[in-house]
Image: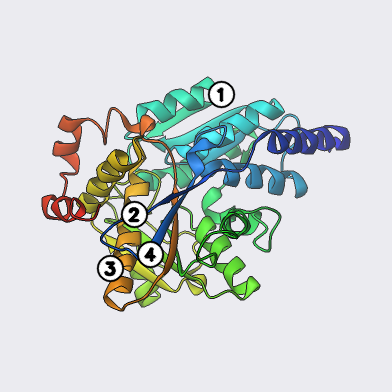
Amino acid sequence: MNNNWTKQAFAKIAADYTRSADTHLIPFNLTAFPHIEFYLKDESTHPTGSLKHRLARSLFLYALSNGWINENTPIIESSSGSTAVSEAYFAKLLGLPFIAVMAKTTAKEKIKQIEFYGGKCHLVENTTQIYAESQRLADELGGHYMDQFTYAERATDWRGNNNIAESIFSQMAKEPNPIPRWIVMSPGTGGTSATIGRYVRYQGVDTQLLVVDPDNSVFYDFYKNGDNTLTNQTGSRIEGIGRPRVEPSFVPGVIDDMLKVPDGQSIAAMMWLTNLLGRKVGPSTGTNLVGMLHLAKQMHQAGQSGSIVSLICDSGERYLNTYYDNDWQHAHIPIDANYQNWLSTLV
């Protein structure tokens, strides 16, 4: 192992982190819920455009610390897109080759971004094939399979070190209700929900974590019945979240409640929020918003006040040819018209 190269790699990642300011916390209010404040942490402003920038940085630091990669190691990752974009960025930073294994249905914009950072895309027919194919490539090339779905929950320091949870609470400090009543998160690996849930318990604050799961994902059912052998051959239609199997990084014990969100509601919420903010957001952000509004309705009916925080996971610019294309949308995930009409009454 080349210790000088490893030291330089740590220094390059630290310098990249220092150059990047923290992401913004965007407030908004709704007349239908006058005593509730809503906040969205805008993770789309990371250098690689999504929440997964944090995860990729942590995974590289974890692998470097464990001695799993050196100056000649090809990096392989199974990904639905955004993690691969961010890992391609860090691989380029360290001068390492990168291959992303993903389903052929991945948004073309994400594939272009991976290639922009010098990465290569290895496409498979079905999401369920990405795990075995990633390991096969790593074995064949003498590379390292980063395996976000196993290591996401352990690569991030959940006690602090400017993780996303610590950042949220720091930015909320001067708000009217600085301790959120709820934080809402949608799981891809489960790593972010694990970080937030652990941090909340570690700090002893009265914040609860709601995790929202899209159609064709097994996380919700696993949370309810504890069966970690569950699988789904269809796969989530909300890119970046939901999984066809129970991932090792998904930690149900840190979650206070889960909500199953129909895909048609996610897309309706995505379009509604795009109009509210004057900018496009990704479909997983729509899923998050459905969860926020579900909680707001419950709080309003119970006469409760307080704040709810969630995430803008990535920008809608990555989905111009899919979720924001009318023909594609009608063919794949028609908007829930009743939910769309209800949303129009909230402002």
Q: Which mark is residue 297?
A: 3
Please state the horizontal and vertical placement of residue 166, each as a whole percent of the image.
63, 58
State the residue in front, 33 or 208: 33
Q: Nearer the viewer, mark 3 or mark 2?
A: 3
Number of other residues with Cα within 10 Å of mark 1, as a class: few under 14, some 14 to 19, many 20 or more: some
Tag 2 secondary structure:
helix
Q: Quadrant of the N terminus?
A: top right
Tag 3 secondary structure:
helix
Tag 1 secondary structure:
loop
Label 3 to label 2, Cα distance in Å? 12 Å
Q: Are marks 2 and 4 in contact (CB under 8 Å)?
A: no
Amino acid type indicated by mark 3: Lys
Please state the horizontal and vertical placement of residue 33, each as a whole percent of the image.
30, 63
Q: Which mark is residue 117?
A: 1
Q: Which residue is mark 2?
A: 289
Specify which label sits upstream in the sequence, 3 or 4.
4
